[in-house]
């Protein structure tokens, strides 16, 4: 097992250092310049369009709203990456990892905009509304079905199987830590029991379809995120006099001015960027699968909403975790996962906060399991929508949730890094030739906003855009709300 883990770590380091991070940064900077810094320039617009009302699906029920699609992607984003991933990044890379996490979020917001706008443009109609994502814009936009198939396979393995193992692992760890502090017996038996309960409640939701997932995510994610943020703000308030020194430490450590046992500058950059990508998922090709489900009048609307999700995740939720951990004077160079965040809360708020975080972690990670499951379902449907295949997929997801509950922490996280990196690379290669289309749509959107109207897109106005399955007929030159379907 140790040899396998060491091999994965070596592969990870080379792959991320020499290929993925340079590719992501180069493209993200290019998208930022070409879009006129859309991730900051249209920030007020992001808050406006998230309130868009959905249409009616062919089955007679409401389609997925812009906010519900945001909640599905937030369900996958907000969870282990924010609470465990940030703690791991700090222990391995020092305070400087936080700076690189922040910087990455600001830059890669443009990549999130491009991928989610393209997912909206090339989405396809289904009985409950819409389905789409990178596999679909690879097929309909690039005309490369093989690439879409490859991506669909990789994202299904990454999110539905590997990432769900990570989420289950973090849930189990938090419950074990809480039980141990109360004096209860812990061990493999407890972890197996937790896995069995997770399988039961996950099965009850995922067999109910995308609407049930959206409703659960919409109800749980905002509430639990707010509770966690409030706990963090209390900790920050109790140590407000130390905050300036912590911020200074973050910036100084980011540029190698202060060395850590973990390797200084390189460790800070690598861990900050890796954990940042795991947390906000910008450029990975995951959030577009949720964004494509939204019923909106213009593809850019959901591109903006999904970009807002990057900020919500990294600049808000991840920052709260970072300050909770750093205010507890952590020991660098140790990989302790959720226990570090729980211990940091307990040091400031008392032992009750350990159990409060366990509940928060359980609910946030559970909704992440649901969001991850949907990403796999959407892409499996791209490969085969046969009922038997989908049932088998759901059973495999439940099996991975169960196994993840007691798998070794370090091995699970390292496997997540490998699969996430491969998936992101495929997506970024597809975004490079397609990004110009996203900028055409952005200009169409901003031109309509300057005229004082709520933007509506129609493919009839852009005959050069081929492969578009929704957004009205090719001869429709004016567009209307009905052009969504």
Image (cartoon, grey):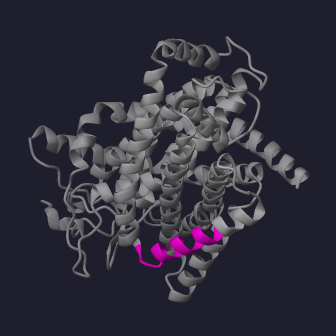
Q: At 73% from the left edge and 51% from the top edge, which residue is drawn?
A: 409
Please give the range of residues in magenta. 195-209
Looking at the rendered image, the quarter that the C terminus falls into is bottom left
Q: Nearer the viewer, residue 421 or 324?
A: 324
- The outermost residue toward the front is 183
Position of residue 50 in the picture relative to residue 186 (left or right): left
Looking at the rendered image, the quarter that the N terminus falls into is bottom right
Vertical placement of 226 versus 469: above or below?
Answer: above
Position of residue 33 in the picture relative to residue 459 (left or right): right
**Where does residue 5 sit, x and y in percent of width and height?**
83, 50
**Where does residue 464 sit, x and y in percent of width and height?**
31, 58
When asked about the image quadrant of residue 401, the answer is: bottom right
- Majority secondary structure of magenta residues: helix
Is residue 159 found inside the magenta-colored segment of the image? no
Residue 22 can be seen, yes or no: no
Q: Nearer the viewer, residue 153 or 98?
A: 98
Vertical placement of 390 versus 173: above or below?
Answer: below
Q: At 77% from the left edge and 54% from the top edge, which residue is drawn?
A: 408
């Amino acid at each position: 097992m140790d040899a396998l883990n060491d091999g994965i770590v070596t592969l990870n380091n080379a792959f991320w250092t020499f290929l993925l991070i340079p590719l992501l940064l180069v493209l993200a900077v290019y998208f930022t310049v070409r879009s006129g810094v859309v991730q900051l320039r249209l920030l007020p617009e992001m808050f406006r369009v998230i309130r868009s009302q959905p249409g009616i699906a062919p089955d007679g029920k409401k389609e997925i709203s812009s906010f519900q699609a945001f909640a599905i992607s937030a369900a996958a984003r907000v969870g282990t990456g924010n609470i465990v991933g940030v703690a791991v990044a700090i222990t391995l890379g020092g305070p400087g990892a936080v700076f690189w996490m922040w910087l990455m979020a600001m830059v890669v917001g443009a990549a999130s905009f491009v991928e989610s706008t393209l997912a909206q443009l090339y989405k396809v109609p289904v009985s409950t509304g819409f389905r789409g994502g990178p596999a679909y814009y690879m097929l309909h936009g690039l005309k490369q079905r093989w690439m879409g198939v490859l991506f669909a396979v990789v994202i299904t393995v990454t999110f539905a199987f590997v990432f769900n193992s990570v989420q289950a692992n973090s849930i189990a760890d938090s419950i074990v830590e809480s039980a141990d502090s109360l004096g209860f017996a812990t061990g493999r038996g407890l972890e197996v029991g937790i896995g069995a309960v997770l399988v039961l409640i996950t099965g009850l939701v995922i067999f109910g379809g995308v609407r049930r997932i959206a409703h659960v995510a919409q109800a749980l994610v905002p509430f639990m995120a707010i509770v966690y943020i409030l706990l963090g703000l209390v900790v920050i308030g109790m140590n407000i006099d130390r905050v300036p020194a912590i911020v200074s430490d973050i910036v100084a450590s980011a540029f190698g001015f202060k060395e850590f046992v973990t390797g200084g500058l390189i460790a800070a950059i690598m861990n900050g960027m890796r954990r940042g990508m795991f947390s906000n998922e910008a450029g990975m090709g995951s959030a577009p699968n949720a964004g494509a489900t939204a019923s909106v009048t213009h593809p850019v609307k959901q591109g903006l909403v999904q970009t807002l999700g990057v900020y919500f995740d990294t600049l808000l939720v991840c920052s709260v975790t970072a300050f909770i951990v750093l205010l507890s004077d952590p020991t660098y160079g140790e990989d302790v996962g959720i226990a570090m965040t729980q211990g940091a809360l307990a040091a400031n708020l008392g032992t009750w906060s350990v159990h409060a975080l366990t509940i928060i972690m359980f609910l946030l990670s559970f909704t992440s399991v649901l969001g991850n499951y949907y990403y796999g379902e959407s892409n499996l449907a791209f490969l085969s929508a046969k009922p038997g295949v989908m049932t088998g997929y759901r059973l495999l997801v439940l099996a991975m949730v169960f196994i993840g509950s007691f798998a070794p922490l370090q091995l699970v996280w390292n496997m997540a890094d490998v699969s996430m990196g491969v998936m992101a690379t495929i997506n970024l290669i597809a975004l490079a030739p397609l990004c110009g289309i996203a900028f055409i749509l952005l200009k169409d959107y901003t031109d309509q906003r300057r005229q004082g109207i709520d933007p509506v897109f129609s493919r009839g106005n852009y005959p050069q855009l081929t492969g578009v399955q929704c957004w009205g007929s090719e001869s429709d030159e004016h567009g209307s709300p009905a052009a969504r379907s």
